[in-house]
Image: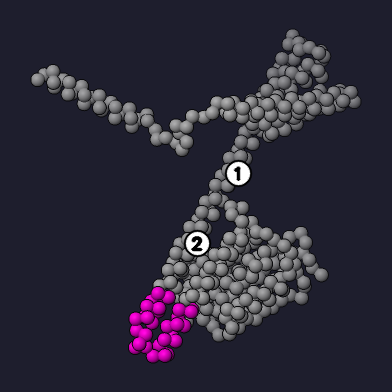
Amino acid sequence: MKRSGKAENRKKNQQKWQRFWRHSYIQPKKPGAGVRPVPGKKLSWNMRVIGKNMVITLGLLLLATVVAYFYDQLTPQTMNIMMFYTLALLLISRTTDGYLPGILAAMISVVCVNYLFTYPYWKINFTLDGYPVTFFGMMVVSVLTSASASHMKRQSEVLAEREKMLAEAGKEKMRANLLRAVSHDLRTPLTGIIGASSSYLENEAHLSEEEKHSLVQHIEEDADWLLNMVENLLTVTRIQGDAGSVNKSMEPVEEVMSEAVFRLKKRIPDAKVKVELPEEFVMIPMDAMLIEQVLVNLMENAIYHGGSTEPVECSVSIEKDFVTIYVTDHGIGIPEEKINTIFDGTGQTESSSSDGHKGMGIGLSICKTIILAHGGTIRVRNLEQGAQFSFTLPRGEDTGAE
């Protein structure tokens, strides 16, 4: 019994130690762990990097030596000669990988200066007064200069990587907002279409002509809303992937605004729009179809959600470096709690206008995406009566003014 008890205790202790070692030292595998690297490829890559660093280091040091030699023939001043090697050190530290090439270059530079351009020439003599102090002083300064330059390069790379990650995070957030808005905005009109069509089919024999017409009209409105949403989503596909860029060409502002109003009139025949254009003829680099979509979205938003019978006003302001386009309504304005999130795809997706039209949903979010892809800005503010949307577009090098 005693032996069995000791064996059981020994087994429990072994299990405890196994659990301890497992939780203390066994780390979860990283992505790609367990895949054996190919030695030949890694060695080949390392040799290429080392070869590149050697070529850059020796080439710049040789160039600095040649320039220093010709300079020494004109005016033999050792301290000025050191300036050429210092410049070479900075270039080596900025163009090579790691700290080692810069540090080695610093040591070689000090030896070259003392061996080639400092008395006694063509030899290094530490027995002379002040020679060791000068030699090692130059060595320390050169190494510190090289290490500092390499560190600054590394820091700039880290900052660039961090900015890239922040930009990617912003894009992911924008995609998430768009998907959230799409899921809501697609469900709402589809539910309306299904409900109206089901009522029509189930009660067709008992419905009056007026009721049938009303149900069909609701189906048409919801289908039109879905079509508008699909157009907005297709608009985003014109923005090229992760680069977030657009294909720009010089377009006249007047024609773009006229085309946007024409498209709006086709969708809303009784829409009232007042356009004020400057006397100056202005050409702006843009994707005309995308900017027209922005204008249509903003004007449609003003008509449906402004709550006013007065015309929507569109105007243009020309500055030196950019052009600002305003879309203003004289309605009820925008609730203050929604102004900060109105371009996120969530500002109006849950609301409807007073006449039963659905919220803008992804429309305003896509407007923001398009304007940012053009390098501009978009904002909204409440006026004493109504709201005003505005966005800016850079004029570019060729303003096209006549």
Counting other residues with Cα less than 10 Å from the Cα at mark 2, is it few (<14), some (14-19), or many (20 or more)? many
**Amino acid at the residue labelled 1:** Ala
Q: Residue furthest left?
A: 1
Q: Residue furthest right?
A: 74
Q: Position of residue 101 (x, y in %)?
A: 67, 26
Q: CA distance from mark 2 to mark 1?
A: 27 Å
Q: How many marks?
A: 2
Q: Residue at x 58, y 40 (%)?
A: 158
Q: Which residue is nearer to you in this view: 72 or 229?
A: 229
Q: Which residue is mark 1?
A: 160
Q: Which residues are magenta?
A: 192-221
Q: Residue at x 21, y 26 (%)?
A: 12
Residue 124 numbered mark, or none: none
Q: Position of residue 59 (x, y in %)?
A: 76, 27
Q: As displayed, is residue 237 above or below residue 148?
A: below
Q: Which residue is mark 2?
A: 178
Q: Position of residue 279 (x, y in %)?
A: 76, 76
**Amino acid at the residue labelled 2:** Leu
Q: Which residue is nearer to you in this view: 388 or 289?
A: 289
Assign the C terminus to one quadrant of the image. bottom right
Q: Residue at x 76, y 28 (%)?
A: 60
Q: Quadrant of residue 382?
A: bottom right
- Secondary structure type for disc 2: helix
Principal secondary structure, stretch drawn in magenta: helix
Q: Position of residue 57 (x, y in %)?
A: 72, 27
Q: Would residue 346 appear left or right of 246 to someone viewing this image?
A: left
